[in-house]
Image (spheres, rainbow, N blue to C red):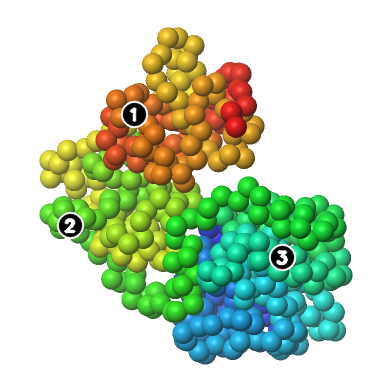
Amino acid sequence: MYIQQLYTGCLSEAAYYIESNGEAAIIDPLRETQPYTELAHQRNAKIKYVFETHFHADFVSGHIDLAAKTGAKIIFGPDAETAYKVIIAKDNEVFTIGKIKIKVLHTPGHTLESACYLLLDENDRPHAVFSGDTLFVGDVGRPDLSQKSEITQSDLAGMMYESLKKLKNLPDNVILYPAHGAGSACGKNIGKETFSTIGTQKKVNYALQEMPKEAFIKAITEGLTPPPNYFFMDAKINMNGYENIDTVLTKNTQALSVIEFENHIANGAQILDVRAADVFESGFIKNAVNIGLNGQYAPWVGALIDPNISIVLVADEGKEKEAVLRLARVGYENVKGYLNGGILAWGKAKKPLEKINSVDAETFVKTLQEKNNFQIIDVRNAGECETGIVENAITIPLAELSQKIHTLKKKQAYCIYCAGGYRSMMASSILQKSGFENITNVRGGMSKIKLSGIALVQPVV
C-alpha cells in the first residue's frame, strides 16, 4: 500500500494518490492531470478510480479530464447529480484497489453529497479516512454552500452533527487526511497541519466535543463570513462539466501586442498584474489590479475579480502559462491573453505608467509619531486583528473592500497595511483604480510594524 498527499499551498488543497498492487486511485485532483498520470507512470500503476468527496466550490477538479485520459471511473457519494457519467456510490459501498479497499461514508453537512472515504488495509483494518471538507484539522467544513435554496445553513449544520458521529466512531489511530489546510475559506479556522488522527481530533477539535445539536449548530455557524463570490460558480462547473484543460491553456495563453492589449482594455477587459508587490509598485498600467503569483493568487482572484468579465494579464516573462493555469484551477477561463514582453513592452511603446508610494514600517511609525493627516486602513481579517491593530486604524478585510469602498473619501490620504504586504498592495491597487490618488502602502505590514515596538490596541467592535 502506498499513499501520497499532493498539497498545493496557494489553494491550501490536498489531493491524494493511493496505490496497491499496480492499481491506483486519486482523491480530489486539481484541474491539471499531469501530476497524477506521471506519478502513476513512474510507479508502473494504472489509475482505476477518481474519488470526489463533494462538488468543490473553491476549485475546479480535474476528475473529468483525468478519467478521460486514463479510463478511470469517477465516484461520487450519495445524492450527487452530474451532467456527465459517474458512479453514484451508496453509503458503506466498498471499492477494491489492488489488495486494499475504499469504503464510502456518506457525510452530508458541508454539502448534501459530501462523502468521506475510509481506507481499509490488506487485513481489512481501518487505516486512514479521506475526509474532504467534512472534517479538517481543528475545524469542520462550512455549512452554507447548498445548491438548493430550500436547504439552510442550519439544516446542513444539523446534518454535519450526525455525520461526524461516523468519524468519531472510527478507531483513534485512523489517520485523518482532509482536503484543505490553513488558509482555505472552506472552514473558519483550519489548523496548519495537513493531516492528523481521529484520536487527536477528538481531543482538540471543538466540533468533535460532546454537545447538544443546537449548541453544535451555533458553534459552526457563528462568525461565518460570506463565501467568496466564485464558490457557487465552481460548484456548478464541477457538477456540469467543463472544457478540456489543454484546450483552455492553448486558448488563454495568447501573446498580445500593445495594440491588441489596449483594444481588449477598451472593450472592458480587466488588467490583472501578477507580478510581486514590490515590483508592481514601481510601475504599472493604469487601472491594473495587482494579485501576485507569489501568494494565494487564485483564491484572491476569485474573491476580488468578477468572474463574468474578461481578463488580460501582465506577468514576468516565463510566468504567463502559470498565471493562466492557476486561474483555470478556480474556473476563470475568460482570459484574452497576456502582454507580450510584459511591462517592458509597454514602456518601449512609450505608454504611461502609474506608481504607488510605499514606505517601510520604520518610516510609517515615525510618521505616526509626528503630526499627520492620513487615515490608516488595516485590511487583515477579523481574527488577525484580534492580536492588535495600529491605534486609530479602521479595519476593512480585503475581501470586503470593494463593498465598503463607498464609505471612504477620495480626497483623503490613506495608509494601508496587512500582515506582510501582499494584501495591502492589492488593496492599494483597487483603491487607485477607483480614483483614490493619495495612497501609501506599508511594506512588510504588521510583521514589520511589530518589530518597531509600537503599542497596539484592540479593534473597536
Q: Can you give x and y, in whole percent of width and height, for residue 276 in the image? A: 39, 43
Q: Can you give x and y, in whole percent of width and height, for residue 435 in the image? A: 27, 35
**Disc 2 to disc 3: CB gap under 8 Å:** no
Which residue sits at x=51%, y=21%? 392
On the image, numbered disc 3 is attached to which residue?
158
Going from N to C along the chain, the mark reached first, 2 or 3, is 3
In the rendered structure, which amino acid carries the disc numbered 3?
Gly
Mark pair 2, 1: CA separation: 29 Å
On the image, numbered disc 2 is attached to which residue?
267
The reply to whether residue 277 is visible in this rendering is: no
Where, quadrant-wise, is the N terminus in this rendering?
bottom right
Q: Residues within 10 Å of mark 1 (few under 14, many from 20)?
A: few
Between 28 and 432, the one lying in front of the other is 432
Mark pair 1, 3: CA separation: 44 Å
Which residue sits at x=54%, y=28%? 448
Q: Can you give x and y, in whole percent of width and height, for residue 54 in the image? A: 59, 73
Residue 409: give its label.
1
**Disc 2 to disc 1: CB gap under 8 Å:** no
